[in-house]
Image (spheres, grey):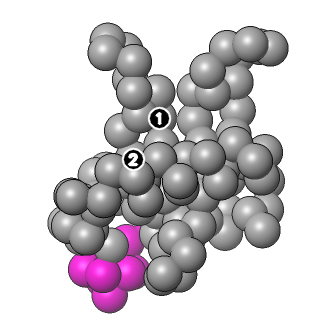
């Protein structure tokens, strides 16, 4: 299910949402989004010097917020869009 369908059907907390296909060949842009989350401090970690376990960032091109979770192995992040409900009620802080 895509973010548009979840919002249209007013699904508050879907189990899984597909990331928009626009990110498939934009590795540098995805990396920039993760860097933006680190710069903004919109992440949680298990301690100093440890990679963040979760990050949140707003898409600069659309009004979509993404959550990225650290996956092991391999080290890297798996990201997905959040519904407007999840952004309003499920985040540990307010996003800029």
In this image, 6 relative to 87: left or right? Answer: left
Name the image quarter holding residue 41: top right
Point out residue 26 in the picture as x, y percentages from the top left corner. 30, 59
Residue 26 against residue 61 in the figure, above or below: above
Residue situated in front as seen by the camera: 74 or 15: 74
Residue farthest along the bottom direction in this orientation: 8
| Element type where label 2 sits in the image | strand
Q: Residue at x 56, y 75 (%)?
A: 60
Q: Quadrant of the N terminus?
A: bottom left
Q: Is residue 40 left or right of residue 56?
A: right
Percent x, y of residue 42? 72, 48
Closer-to-camera residue (3/39): 39
**What residue range appears in magenta?**
4-13
Q: Is residue 30 visible?
A: yes
What residue is shown with label 2? 79
Look at the numbered discs 1 and 2 and tell me whether their residues touch, using CB distance below 8 Å. Answer: yes
7 within the magenta span: yes
Q: Which x, y percent locates residue 37?
A: 66, 50
Going by the picture, which residue comes out furthest to the front? 28
- Tell me the crowding category of disc 1: few under 14, some 14 to 19, or many 20 or more residues within 10 angstroms, Cα based: some
Q: Which residue is mark 1?
A: 69
In the rendered image, residue 94 lying in the magenta stretch gets the answer no
């Amino acid at each position: 299910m895509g973010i548009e369908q979840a919002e249209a059907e007013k699904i508050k907390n879907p189990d899984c949402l597909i990331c928009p296909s626009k990110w498939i060949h934009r590795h540098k842009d995805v990396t920039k989004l993760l860097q933006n989350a680190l710069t903004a401090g919109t992440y949680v970690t298990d301690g100093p010097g440890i990679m963040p376990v979760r990050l949140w960032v707003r898409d600069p091109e659309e009004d979509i917020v993404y959550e990225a979770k650290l996956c092991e192995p391999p080290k890297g992040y798996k990201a997905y869009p959040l519904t407007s409900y999840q952004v309003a009620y499920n985040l540990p802080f307010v996003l800029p």
